Image (spheres, grey):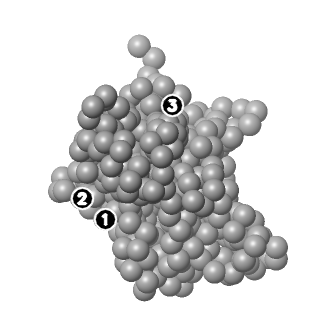
Amino acid sequence: MTKKTQQRIEKLLKLLSDGKFHSGQSIAEKLGVSRTAVWKLIQKIESWQLTVYSIRGRGYQIPGGLELLDQQQLKLSLKNNELFNDVILHASIDSTSNFLAEEWKKSPGYGRVCIAEHQTSGRGRKGRSWVSPFAANLYFSIGVELPLGLSALGGLSLVVGMSICSTLNRFTNDRVKVKWPNDLMVDDHKLAGILVEASGETNDTSFLNIGVGINWDMQNFQGELIDQPWINLKQLLVKSASRQQILTEILCELDAALVDYLTNGFSHFSTKWQGYSAMYQRDVNIMLTNEVVSGKEVGIEANGALRVQTVDGIRLFHSGEVSLRKKMA
Ligand code: BTN
């Protein structure tokens, strides 16, 4: 997509965000393009899983309107962050995590956030894809360089999950829990997923690319590809809040949590794990590459490893997928 098309789409989205009908002619005039070009732009945004009504004689409408994220406001709100305060907002991109990895190669060394309203190739863990319809959810990645070797990053991934969980709990009356290592769950339904990708050139510096997807108001038909029960944040709110407000609070709290981790280490986070864990004292299966281990989750180690009570005693896990073990009828 050319820069010009991008700018036109951004203008078009702002116009239609009021939820009212706009005639093809009036849009064409405001964008300085032909009516055929408007129709093509509409087709483009429809391909981002956005519903646009097109009614002869009335024009185009996005039913219910849109609450779009605002890059300038985000920049202002993040200006005092220590680790990342630069914000890039895209209407549509392949993946915010891919974007940051590429940016890092071009200009490494300073922290930034990439947010998208839509992703064409959103990525989940284990090579899964992440369904990313336009403005229905939150999709963002944070890139930071940390003075830590890759081996120190186990705890850090939990710090990310716990920090976002703590922000979301202020809006939901403590409904959100963390499923090790960093899925966010409500009543065994997935609310958010976190993809932590790290690379290190030396033993004492790592580039951390933290990708976060939070379900906000995802519709069922868009969720056909999702292979597990999921839930939306919007339906859990106990006070009114916009995506923008929640995202801002997540980004500020996460910046502070990472600084805290760098200054004080992981141990004081690990002592709080029980209060955060979705699986503490529950029967779980740990899916490893060639094995499934059953047991009861009994906490985490000071380095972030999961402690599981099995029939052979306590086992520690540094990686793997945790799932709830269903009771036999
Ligand atoms: C998971 O599998 O649970 C992790 C999902 C992470 C999805 C987010 S959406 C923003 C960022 N960009 C991506 O391509 N993936 C992450």
Element on which disc 2 rests = loop
The mark closer to the camera, 3 or 1, is: 1
Q: Are marks 3 and 2 in contact (CB under 8 Å)?
A: no
Q: Which residue is mark 2?
A: 241
Q: Which residue is mark 3?
A: 226
Q: Amino acid at mark 3?
A: Ile
Along the polypeptide, which appears first: circle 3 or circle 1? 3
Mark 1 neighbour class, 10 Å CA radius: few under 14, some 14 to 19, many 20 or more: some
Residue at the (55%, 64%) spot, across then down: 114
171 relative to 211 in the view: left or right: left
Tell me which residue sits at (80%, 76%) in the image.
Answer: 203
C-alpha span from label 3 to label 2: 26 Å
For marks 3 and 2, the one nearer the N-term is 3
Q: Position of residue 68 (x, y in %)?
A: 36, 56
> How many numbered circles does the render carry?
3
Q: Which residue is mark 1?
A: 245
Q: Dot 3: few (<14), some (14–19), or many (≥20) neighbours within 10 Å?
A: few
The answer to which image quadrant residue 42 occupies is top left
Where is residue 262? Give x, y as percent. Answer: 57, 80
Q: Secondary structure at mark 3?
A: loop
Q: Where's residue 146, x and y in %? A: 65, 78
Residue 290 makes an appearance in the image: yes
Q: Please state which of residues 239 and 73 is positioned toward the viewer in this rendering.
A: 73
CB-based contact (under 8 Å), mark 1 and mark 2: yes
